[in-house]
Image (spheres, rainbow, N blue to C red):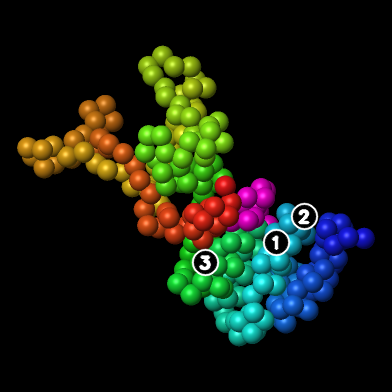
Amino acid sequence: MTKSKSLQVNKTDLIASIAKSTVGVVPFAGTLLSELVGTIIPNQRIDRLTKYVQELDNRLSKIQSEKINNLISNEEFVDLIEEGFVQASRAISDERRSYIVSIVTNGITNELISLNESKYLLKILEELNDIEIIWLRFYLDSIKGGDEEYREKHKNILTPVISYLGSDKETINKASIQKSYKEHLERLQLIKSKINFDVKTGLPVFDKSTGKPITSYTMITNLGELLLEQIGILNDEIK
């Protein structure tokens, strides 16, 4: 039976497969991962972890065993690994699982970001759905005519939905949801909008119908770029 098939049999086979494939390359990591799977992941979610475990195993095997060995007793490392498993158990798409793997492994290998900061980014990722991540990537190059290939690939999501007085209920609903994606990204400080100011008064210009400041454009923040980098999108690992 192949490794891929054995991972889909049951929980015991999954744990055994992790231990056998990982321990030989990265001492102790396989034991740690298998214990975490056995203690924090409900049985009914094991199937969601299959691909995640395989990808994580592959990435961990490329890290020097000494580095992993030194982190085993680090509570921040264990906490990051646990958080990754918990989120992976809920992930229903391959892209989401890859995002989680990237944050976890970057937290271990990237000297410019700490384990705690990686966990913080994982928590932000947890608040975003896959559509919001596509929108966040859009704001990386949101100028007119920017990244046409990306926009064409995701045009079913990125095409603006505009509702007017008299629009049908379906259009109104879709426009409201699409608007909420942007507002959510702004609340998380992943994007920010350029507010228009009155030249004479120096005060923001407000929309009379909504009472909110009028904005000219929206751009990604440093935090937004960092998140894209850590989940593997900024460097085009994942599109």
Label pair 3/2, CB-CB below 8 angstroms: no
Locate residue 143, reporting x and y percent.
Answer: 37, 38
Answer with left or right where residue 7 lies relative to residue 102.
Answer: right
Q: 11 or 105, which lies in front?
A: 105
Which quadrant does the N terminus fall into? bottom right
Label 1: few (<14), some (14–19) or many (≥20) C-alpha neighbours in 10 Å: some
What residue is at 42 percent from the left and 38 percent from the top? 146
Judging by the rendered image, the residue that carries numbered circle 1 is: 55
Q: Is residue 109 magenta?
A: no
Q: Residue at x 63, y 56 (%)?
A: 98
Q: CA distance from mark 1 to mark 3?
A: 19 Å
Marks 1/2: CA–CA distance: 14 Å
- Residue identifier under label 2: 47
Disc 3: which residue: 119
Q: Earlier along the polypeptide chain: callout 1 or callout 3?
A: 1
Q: Residues within 10 Å of mark 2 (few under 14, many from 20)?
A: some
Query: Is disc 1 in contact with disc 3, using a CB cutoff of under 8 Å?
Result: no
Which class describes the residues within 10 Å of circle 3: few (<14), some (14-19), or many (20+)?
many
Residue located 46% across and 46% down the image: 136
Local SS, label 2: helix
Q: Secondary structure at mark 1?
A: helix
Q: Amino acid at mark 2?
A: Asp
Decide which of 56, 207 is in the foreground and name it. Answer: 56
Numbered range of the magenta stretch: 89-99
Report the amino acid beneath label 3.
Lys
- Dot 3 falls on a residue whose secondary structure is helix
Tell which tag, 1 or 2, sits nearer the viewer.
1
Residue in the foreground of this view, choosing between 20 and 125: 20
Q: CA distance from mark 3 to mark 2?
A: 24 Å
Q: Residue at x 61, y 52 (%)?
A: 96
Q: Position of residue 29 (x, y in %)?
A: 70, 77
